[in-house]
Image (spheres, rainbow, N blue to C red):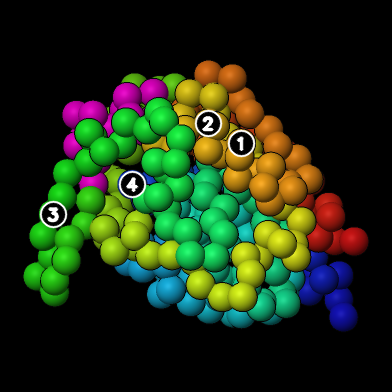
């Protein structure tokens, strides 16, 4: 097997109210270290179908993979990695790391501090159900308070909504993937979507190899803290190579 095939590829999965270009700063730093990354356009329709899509992407690459999830993307990578031998490590970036049956909505409310409920706006869908997006006027403060104001304003109008069903869908399977795979956790102390206490608790529960809290950082870590995020990913890649 060639070195190229053995070299892990990093699969980046954005969460709700973000999109794949939010990883640009992280990708640049990984590329500078010779690490290949793919930013997936997460459909944000359901945990099951979103995870199936991520598994399809991994299968198409023909290489071992490190899965990285931001926010709801953590729910997706946990589901996608279950029983997937190509996945060698998991990185949770301000992300949910659920146990079987746990939902993103329940985990975000398990500890006090989230103000997301007051910032989201519902939109009815023709096919039934609804989706949520963050009020653009509230987006900068809610999602990216520590970002450049101009960049936060752009993020507000390019955000991708998530279905309410996805946020209420529990993890399925025999056990969460973080029980068998090494994991890394990084989050901000000033996260207004998912309380820092919840993110710390999930990392501790998962027995993460590294738990890193960035003082003063908000929820949009891939955009505002690409250096520390890339650093955690590179350390996961080093273990995945072994």
Residue 66 position in % (x across, y down): 69, 60
Element carrying mark 2: helix
Query: Is residue 30 in view?
Result: no
Q: Is the Cβ of the residue at disc 4 closer than 8 Å to that at disc 1?
A: no
Indicate which disc, 2 or 3, sits on the residue closer to the N terminus.
3
**Is residue 164 or residue 19 the one in the foreground?**
164
CA gap between label 3 and label 1 equals 32 Å
Name the residue tied to disc 4. 17
Name the residue tied to disc 2. 196
In the displayed structure, 209 sits above or below 137; it is: below
In the displayed structure, 38 sits above or below 174; it is: above
Indicate which disc, 3 or 1, sits on the residue closer to the N terminus.
3
Res 240 → quadrant: bottom right
Name the residue tied to disc 3. 123
CA gap between label 2 and label 3 equals 28 Å
Q: Residue at x 57, y 34 (%)?
A: 187
Q: Residue at x 48, y 65 (%)?
A: 101
CA gap between label 2 and label 4 equals 19 Å
Labels 2, 3: front one: 2
Indicate which disc, 4 or 1, sits on the residue closer to the N terminus.
4
Query: Is residue 60 in view?
Result: yes
CA gap between label 3 and label 4 equals 14 Å
Residue 126 lies in the magenta stretch: no
Q: Residue at x 56, y 75 (%)?
A: 173
């Amino acid at each position: 097997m060639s070195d190229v095939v053995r070299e892990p590829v990093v699969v980046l999965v954005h969460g709700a109210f973000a999109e794949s270009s939010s990883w640009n700063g992280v990708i640049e730093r990984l590329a500078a270290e010779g690490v290949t990354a793919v930013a997936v356009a997460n459909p944000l329709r359901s945990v099951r179908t979103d995870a199936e899509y991520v598994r399809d992407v991994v299968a198409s690459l023909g290489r071992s993979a490190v899965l990285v999830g931001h926010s709801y993307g953590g729910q997706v990578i946990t589901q996608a990695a279950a029983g997937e031998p190509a996945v060698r490590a998991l990185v949770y970036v301000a992300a949910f790391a659920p146990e079987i049956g746990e939902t993103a909505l329940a985990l975000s409310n398990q500890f006090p501090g989230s103000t997301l409920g007051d910032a989201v706006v519902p939109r009815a869908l023709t096919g039934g159900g609804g989706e949520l997006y963050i009020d653009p006027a509230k987006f900068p403060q809610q999602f990216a308070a520590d970002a450049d104001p101009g960049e936060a304003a752009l993020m507000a109008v390019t955000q991708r909504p998530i279905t309410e069903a996805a946020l209420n869908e529990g993890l399925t399977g025999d056990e969460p993937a973080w029980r068998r795979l090494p994991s890394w956790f990084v989050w901000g102390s000033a996260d207004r979507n998912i309380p820092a206490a919840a993110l710390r608790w999930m990392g501790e529960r998962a027995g993460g190899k590294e738990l890193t809290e960035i003082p003063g950082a908000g929820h949009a870590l891939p955009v505002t803290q690409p250096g520390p995020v890339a650093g955690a990913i590179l350390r996961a890649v080093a273990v995945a190579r072994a």
